[in-house]
Image (tube, rainbow, N blue to C red):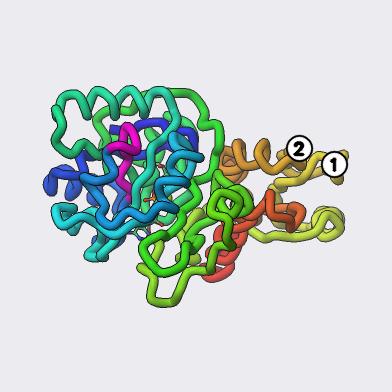
């Protein structure tokens, strides 16, 4: 089932059902061995899934759940290998979207005290831009998914922030909906960068979040020059409202230079620009400040992947 969350749409399967997980991987075209996030109705369900839950995890849960934060914790012995990808950890999140929450509540009631978690990767084909509307899910997964609940466009627009609390020091695995500084404030300590021994995060592969067209992160000047000197290429542009007033002869989307607003429409904009059939998508480099960390991460990966493919 396709289900809206406040970050992106997820594809949901009972995290305690190996067959359901098998179908989930199949529908996404996702290689096995990549762990998924288990979504819960509330933080009280943590002990079903995680063991040795540190105080820091409880504090972050209290501060940010329900919301766009995922916690990686030591897994409890019953968690299926299809969920953890064979790792000794499990990723958990309590989403804030009312529809996701209602489904999780109902699932949890039906389970009557037994573990009730929904494995929910983003509902896109593996390696593509995440969906932020029900329509995106249908376009990507089509017949592979029997039901999509339409909760409108996602409010956050990029995936949750992932913090690993399974090691000696809390580490930031993926920037996202909640900012690093917000987390560090609750922890009262800086977040470490992930260690090399940490499990492979698919989002950290360069082929992630990629549109089909070649995508480049460039300055405003480079966009203007590229359009002025262009002879044959079909150029699409994602620009910032503050700097580019008018862009002739290009498919252009102009977005306010406010990180949260930009994030909300980012994936829909990349999909729309890609759908113009452009040869190249020029994306104006947003400000390189902490507020933009999640957006910059997704843009760099998308641009990096496009380059690698030529
Ligand atoms: O906002 C989100 O997190 C969305 C919505 C649907 O909740 N979900 C999402 O799922 O982005 P997915 O599968 O596209 O990305 C999950 C990320 C992957 O990068 C995965 O490697 C990482 O979480 N992950 C899952 N379990 C992990 C674990 N035990 N240790 C480290 N990383 C883990
Ligand atoms: Mg994903």
Name the quadrant of the C terminus.
Answer: bottom right
User: Relative to the observer, which residue lies in front, 152 or 96?
Assistant: 96
Name the quadrant of the N terminus.
Answer: top left
What residue did someone put label 2 on?
Answer: 256
Q: Give the distance between the C-alpha atoms of the residues marked 1 and 2, in whole angstroms.
A: 7 Å
In the shown orientation, is residue 29 left or right of residue 268?
left
Residue in the picture at 29% in, 60% down? 74
Identify the magenta region: 37-44
In the shown orientation, is residue 60 left or right of residue 31?
right
Which corner quadrant of the image does residue 84 belong to? bottom left
Q: Is residue 88 above or below residue 107?
A: below
Tell me whether circle 1 and circle 2 mark residues in contact (CB < 8 Å): yes
- Whether residue 260 appears in this view of the structure is yes
Task: Tell me the crowding category of disc 2: few under 14, some 14 to 19, or many 20 or more residues within 10 angstroms, Cα based.
Answer: few
Q: Which mark is residue 242?
A: 1
Q: Is residue 185 above or below residue 137?
A: below
Ligand 1 under 8 Å from disc 2 Cβ:
no
User: Relative to the observer, which residue lies in front, 200 or 60?
Assistant: 60
For mark 2, give the secondary structure.
Answer: loop
User: Relative to the observer, which residue lies in front, 68 or 121?
Assistant: 68
Closer to the N terminus: mark 1 or mark 2? 1
- Whether residue 277 appears in this view of the structure is no
């Amino acid at each position: 089932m396709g289900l809206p969350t406040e970050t992106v749409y997820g594809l949901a399967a009972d995290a305690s059902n190996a067959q359901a997980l098998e179908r989930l991987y199949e529908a996404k075209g996702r290689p096995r061995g990549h762990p998924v996030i288990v979504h819960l109705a509330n933080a009280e369900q943590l002990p079903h899934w995680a063991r040795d839950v540190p105080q820091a995890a409880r504090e972050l849960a209290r501060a940010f759940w329900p919301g766009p934060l995922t916690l990686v914790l030591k897994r409890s012995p019953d968690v299926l290998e299809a969920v953890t990808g064979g790792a000794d950890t499990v990723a958990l999140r309590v989403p804030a979207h009312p529809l996701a929450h209602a489904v999780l509540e109902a699932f949890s009631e039906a389970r009557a005290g037994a573990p009730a978690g929904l494995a929910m990767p983003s509902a896109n084909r593996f390696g593509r831009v995440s969906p932020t509307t029900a329509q995106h899910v249908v376009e990507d997964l089509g017949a592979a998914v029997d039901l999509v609940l339409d909760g409108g466009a996602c409010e956050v627009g990029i995936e949750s922030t992932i913090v690993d609390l399974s090691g000696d020091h809390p580490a930031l695995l993926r920037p996202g909906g909640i900012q690093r500084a917000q987390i560090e404030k609750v922890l009262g300590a800086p977040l470490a960068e992930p260690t090399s021994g940490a499990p492979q995060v698919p989002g950290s592969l360069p082929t992630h979040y990629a549109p089909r067209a070649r995508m480049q992160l460039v300055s405003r000047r480079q966009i203007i020059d590229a359009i002025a000197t262009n002879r044959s290429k079909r150029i699409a542009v994602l620009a910032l409202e503050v700097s580019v007033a008018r862009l002739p002869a290009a498919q252009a989307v102009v977005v306010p230079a406010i990180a949260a607003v930009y994030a909300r429409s980012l994936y829909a904009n990349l999909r729309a620009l890609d759908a113009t059939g452009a040869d190249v998508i020029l994306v104006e480099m947003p400000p390189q400040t902490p507020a933009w960390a999640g957006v910059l991460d997704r843009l760099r990966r998308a641009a990096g992947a496009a380059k690698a493919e030529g």
